[in-house]
């Protein structure tokens, strides 16, 4: 089974029976390992069956590309997201009023463009849970897993001098392809994570920087073919030396 997560387009193609046989087997295996996603896809399949039944009497009509199921689902999803975003902006503008409302609107619209915001979100969702694709306490095992998915990445440094040992990793995806979250932990249970992905449309090769997000701090940089972010507790003094160790190795 391939570890590559299917894209949204591939999931729609799976429901519409438009995948190649080999890729269909891979997607089915991935869905078996992710029952929450399988339930979502089954709901799509049920919608498709009901729609086909409702349109059964129109089979002699010429094909209309505007009525294909996958584009219809995607347009509906975009409209739902736009309505929710508009409602959130309106509430903020009414609540804060005047200039303050427009400032809130600006913050809402550009929040998704913060450097490596996906790294912070991935840490919040997965770093403290058991939802990792691989449990790897051996650094060599984690390095081998990383090399299978990111061919141009360097060598993970030994972080034991900082009291950190590998916990595991999870393969993720964004608009530009695969991404990964590597999790490390100290003897007291404190965890930090390393996130990497290919440069994206909004942020290509990035200068080194850092920002605080609540109780977390993200230190980000670009090296070689990838963008990286180290996410740790904002009060963890190991953040910067660990970032330097990773930046020199990867």
Image (cartoon, rainbow, N blue to C red):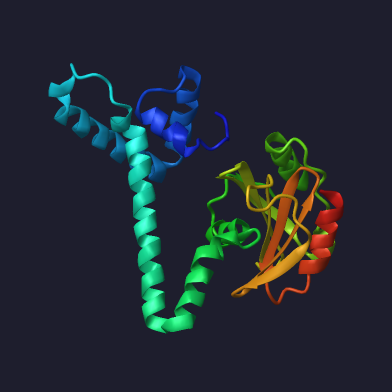
**Residue at image point 54% right, 58% down:** 129
With 206 as the anchor, is 35 left or right in this view?
Answer: left
Q: Is residue 1 visible?
A: yes
Residue 218 sits in quarter: bottom right
Instruction: Provide residue 36's location: percent of width, then percent of height.
Output: 39, 45
Q: How many numbered tags mark residues here?
A: 0
State the residue at coordinates (55%, 65%).
111
> What residue lies at 73% left-to-right and 73% top-to-bottom?
236
Which one is in front, 141 or 206? 206
Residue 201 place in picture, x, y as percent: 63, 47
Residue 142, quarter of the rendered image:
top right
Q: Which residue lies furthest to the front in this view?
A: 98
Residue 190 at x, y = what percent?
Answer: 66, 68
Q: Residue pushed farthest right?
A: 248
Tell whether 187 sits left or right of 33: right
Image quarter of residue 193: bottom right
Q: Is residue 165 left or right of residue 78?
A: right
The spot of residue 156 in percent (x, y) is 80, 48
């Amino acid at each position: 089974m391939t570890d590559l997560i299917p894209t949204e387009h591939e999931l729609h193609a799976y429901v519409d029976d438009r995948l190649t046989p080999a890729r269909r087997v891979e997607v089915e295996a991935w869905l078996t390992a992710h029952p929450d996603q399988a339930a979502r896809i089954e709901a799509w399949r049920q919608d498709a069956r009901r729609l086909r039944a409702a349109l059964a009497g129109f089979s002699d009509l010429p094909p209309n590309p505007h009525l294909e199921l996958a584009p219809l689902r995607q347009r509906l999803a975009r409209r739902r997201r736009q309505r929710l975003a508009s409602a959130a902006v309106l509430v903020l503008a009414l609540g804060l009023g005047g200039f303050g409302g427009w400032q809130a609107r600006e913050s809402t619209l550009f929040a998704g463009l913060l450097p490596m915001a996906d790294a912070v979100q991935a840490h919040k969702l997965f770093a403290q849970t058991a939802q990792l694709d691989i449990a790897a306490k051996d650094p060599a095992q984690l390095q081998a897993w990383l090399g299978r998915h990111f061919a141009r990445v360097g060598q993970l440094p030994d972080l034991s001098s900082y009291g950190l040992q590998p916990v595991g990793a999870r393969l993720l995806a964004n608009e530009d392809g695969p991404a990964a979250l590597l999790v490390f932990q100290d003897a007291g249970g404190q965890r930090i994570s390393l996130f990497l992905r290919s440069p994206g449309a909004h942020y290509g090769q990035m200068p080194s920087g850092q920002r605080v997000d609540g109780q977390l701090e993200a230190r980000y940089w670009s090296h070689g073919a990838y963008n990286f972010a180290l996410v740790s507790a904002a009060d963890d003094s190991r953040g910067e030396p660990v970032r330097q160790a990773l930046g020199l190795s990867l």
